[in-house]
Image: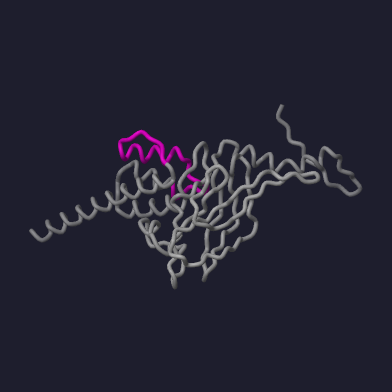
Amino acid sequence: MFRNIYPIFQKKYVLKKEMLENLRDYPRMLFALEYQKYSDGILCGCGLEASTARLAVQPGILIHRGIPYFLQEPFEISCEAQGRLAYLKVCFTDREAGTGHEEYRGQIYLDEQAPDPEREMELGRFKLQHGARLRTEYVDFADYVTEFDTADRIHVPYASPGHPVIWPQLLKRFAAEMLGTGTQDTLDCAFCMGCMQQKENVPYDAVKTYLNVKQDKDREYTPEESYHALQRILEEAKGTRRKHTAEKDNKLLMI
């Protein structure tokens, strides 16, 4: 049967063990039910902010092998300019059992080795040149893959029902630029409005369906592949707009 046990807080009233256990377990139970079918990846937060020789990972939640990991305070790490590709990663350790509890940890660190998907998760990558400052803000959709001095997050998995999805900020940027082309395509408009209105991570199936219909394909996509496919679609839309604008200008000149 369905039920909801709610403790009554009154003066001189002693809470029973069952009530205390209910208070303890309710938040975790609710979280588990809400995200039980989600893939591994960042669930929310974990943004990056850069300063001189420092990189900060903002508070957030990520999922690895079905276990949620919480970062409650910003975590700063040194990022020296080496001119070589560096990976910002989380390395997950084995479960640690303590007195009355068990703990799962994920250590944030930076090195030049590609992430091991069995025990690591990428948060970003970059090539920082000597004398330069790392950027975590972007000019346009194409700027997200600038090779040097820019935090590249197109490979980072975000948690979504059934399959990791591309960074939500990329989808919102794509949507803004696609709508800015003046497209009147029904599929473009529906997908873009959905991306802009979505508060949580966009479902992977929505992204996959859009990409497959636009490209007349039937395949799966990694976050990186999703980005490059979206970039091609956006460039085509911008090219079509430029062509129509040129044709319109030519007609005006003829008149």
Q: Is residue 172 above or below residue 67?
A: below
Q: Is residue 212 above or below residue 183?
A: above
- Does residue 213 belong to the magenta stretch? yes
Query: Image quadrant for the C terminus?
Result: bottom left
Q: Is residue 211 above or below residue 138?
A: above
Estimate the x, y position of residue 68 in percent, counting from the top left. 63, 45
Question: Horizontal placement of 155 versus 32: left or right?
Answer: left
| Occupied quadrant, residue 76 | bottom right
In the picture as drawn, the residue positioned furthest to the top comes out as: 1
- Does residue 140 belong to the magenta stretch? no
Estimate the x, y position of residue 161 in percent, counting from the top left. 52, 38
In the picture as drawn, the residue positioned furthest to the bottom comes out as: 131
| Occupied quadrant, residue 94 | top right
| Occupied quadrant, residue 20 | top right
Identify which residue is drawn at 30% across, 53% down.
181
Q: Nearer the viewer, residue 56 or 32?
A: 56
Q: Is residue 56 above or below residue 214?
A: below
Question: Horizontal placement of 238 versus 224: left or right?
Answer: left
In the picture as drawn, the residue positioned furthest to the left comes out as: 254
Estimate the x, y position of residue 19 in percent, counting from the top left. 81, 40
Identify which residue is drawn at 42% across, 50% down.
171
Query: Image quadrant for the N terminus?
Result: top right
Q: What span is in magenta?
A: 195-221
Question: Horizontal placement of 11 versus 3: left or right?
Answer: right
Identify which residue is drawn at 51% across, 51% down.
122
Estimate the x, y position of residue 233 in percent, counting from the top left. 31, 47
Identify which residue is drawn at 52% across, 44% down.
117
